Amino acid sequence: MRRMPRKLSRPAKASREKRAECEIVQFAEVDFVPPVIPRLVIRFSEGLSVLVEDERSVPLAAAFITAFRAQEKGGAK
């Protein structure tokens, strides 16, 4: 059984449009705007602010606020 040699390349069809050719490849720095994530900010007098990221942070924020209030009422002088 005798095999016919394969064609290594196909001739271009005349009906095809010319493809766009790559002219340059380079790295670029692109700044993407991060998504806005709302957070709860609790502001006190004396310029203190507590930022609560999400519901998991509420117990920690509450403990901090309780300790802060206790310090203001009768803490170290």
Image: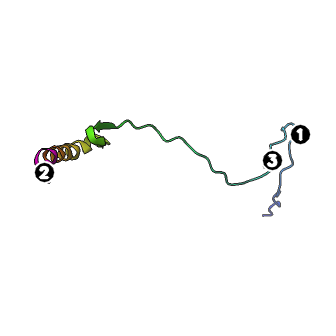
* Direction from residue 49 to residue 62 in the image, left or right: left
Residue 38 position (above or below residue 12): above
Task: Report the amino acid beneath label 1.
Answer: Ala
* Direction from residue 60 to residue 73 in the image, left or right: left
Quarter that holds the N terminus? bottom right
Task: Report the amino acid beneath label 3.
Answer: Glu
Secondary structure beneath dot 1 equals: loop
For this orientation, the residue located farthest to the left is: 74
Q: Which residue is mark 1?
A: 14
Residue 75 is a magenta residue: yes
- Marker disc for residue 75: 2
Q: Which residue is mark 3?
A: 21
- Residue 44 visible in the shown view: no
Q: What's drawn in magenta, residue-wise?
A: 71-77
Q: CA distance from mark 3 to mark 1?
A: 18 Å
Query: Viewer-nearest of labels 1 and 2?
Result: 2
The residue drawn where x is 83% and y is 51% is 10
